[in-house]
Amino acid sequence: MTGRISENFEHADRPGVTVTRKEVGELGTGIFCRFCSTELEQTFVDLGMSPLCESFLSAEQLNQMEPFYPLKAYVCGTCFLVQVGEYVSPESIFTEYAYFSSYSNSWLRHVEKYTHNMVARFGLSSKDRVVELGSNDGYLLQYFVRKGIPALGIDPARNVAKVAVEKGIPTITGFFGVELAQELVRKGTKADLLIGNNVLAQVPDINDFVEGMHLLLSPGGIITMEFPHLMRLIEGNQFDTIYHEHYSYFSFTTAERIFRKHGVALFDVEEQKSHGGSIRIYGQHADSGTRPVSNRVRELRERELGARYNCLETYASFGEKVVETKRNLLQLLIGLKAAGNTIVGYGAPGKANTLLNYCGIRNDFLDYIVDRNSYKHGRFTPGTHIEIFPPERISRDRPDYLFILPWNLKEEIVQQMSFIRDWGGRFIVPVPKPEIVSEF
Ligand SMILES: [Zn+2]
């Protein structure tokens, strides 16, 4: 096995004698890999204690107790799955969900294009059935329905599923896994195209979920899934994309390993720009699939191997990089405040809360945050209690600096807010390294 760096070490009292942790009675973490059950010993990054990132607070809630949970990610020494412990049950996170996929125009354009591509590439017709796991408010399936292709959505969040049903997209409210797949198959439902976008990371029991996919997939069917690529997270220092709602973080190689165990072979992969850098994988039944494996699969596999994603050392160094980023960011902010500048946050996505809590950034640095989502106006960021206002306030207050929290949209935001240069305003971006920017 590769790189189990913490298994053996030299005994403190007997130089030259190597012992295992177990031999000296050292306790393990008691946390086990959700894919392969290996005990997790290697920390990927420890982001301290953090509240749930989507739990924005009302003014009354500011005076109440607020739950914080450990936000610590481990990497498995056997399968290299990066994962956070299941500190919070999926029921408490996903049955009422504040995120409606249809709010994002760029995401809608992305999935509409995807729909055209799938129909053209695989010749889907009214005889096929498309099933989406984590179908949210029907943002994607609506495009298949418009083309006359039967669609079925599955989503645990009642409030968003209701919106999908109102749009005419049949949607089952529930958590997907073997049990639900078996029930659907008994009723004669199978998927010719089985989709999951940004859902794999949110599944605590990954084996049950992927096995369910294998059961639901028709004999010649295709699976496509999109999720953030771990390689982008590490290379881009995107530590703030780690939060309790995301249980797992995948390299292509580890995803391939998980699907292979459940009888699904990946035959193609595409790298996407969305969510800071995602991959879309294509799967088929391992025993009967006939589509050839693309060069892109071989190329990405080799690239990950070349970057040593099969060695624990690659993951172990990430935590130190994150600590350094925190220190540099605080140094930058302290310098700006000492010089008498005003700083306002732009955008309050979930990941902003990982960053603000981990770095301890409150009203001592940011006067307030602005966001376009009206649901968040008048509410406060969890843990750090920074109030959120509509963006219009910026032109009134003319702050010296805008701190861009959704850095994945930085080009768009710098363009939109370019008028702050009229009064000499500038932008701050926290990752990959904290810096002041004027343009891109
Ligand atoms: Zn594992």
Image (cartoon, rainbow, N blue to C red):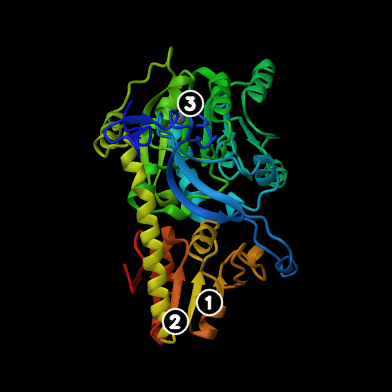
Q: Amino acid at mark 3?
A: Cys
Give the quadrant of residue 417. bottom left
Residue at the limit of the structure toward the top, as seen here: 287
Instruction: Work out whether residue 295 or residue 40 is closer to the camera in this orientation and state it.
Output: 40
Residue corresponding to mark 1: 364
Residue corresponding to mark 3: 36
Percent position of residue 284, x then y: 44, 22
Q: Is mark 1 within 8 Å of ligand 1?
A: no
Percent position of residue 159, x then y: 72, 47
Task: Please tell me how crowded label 3 is: few (under 14), some (14-19), or many (20+) other residues with Cα within 10 Å.
Answer: some
Figure quadrant of the C terminus: bottom left
Residue at the limit of the structure toward the front, as seen here: 13
The residue lying at 45 percent from left, 26 percent from top is 258
In the rendered structure, are the residues bearing label 2 and label 1 in contact, judged by CB atoms less than 8 Å apart?
yes
Mark 1 element type:
loop
Q: Is mark 3 within 8 Å of ligand 1?
A: yes
Task: Please tell me how crowded label 2 is: few (under 14), some (14-19), or many (20+) other residues with Cα within 10 Å.
Answer: some
Residue corresponding to mark 2: 337
User: Does residue 95 sit above or below 51 in this rendering?
Assistant: above
User: Does residue 324 sit above or below 173 in this rendering?
Assistant: below
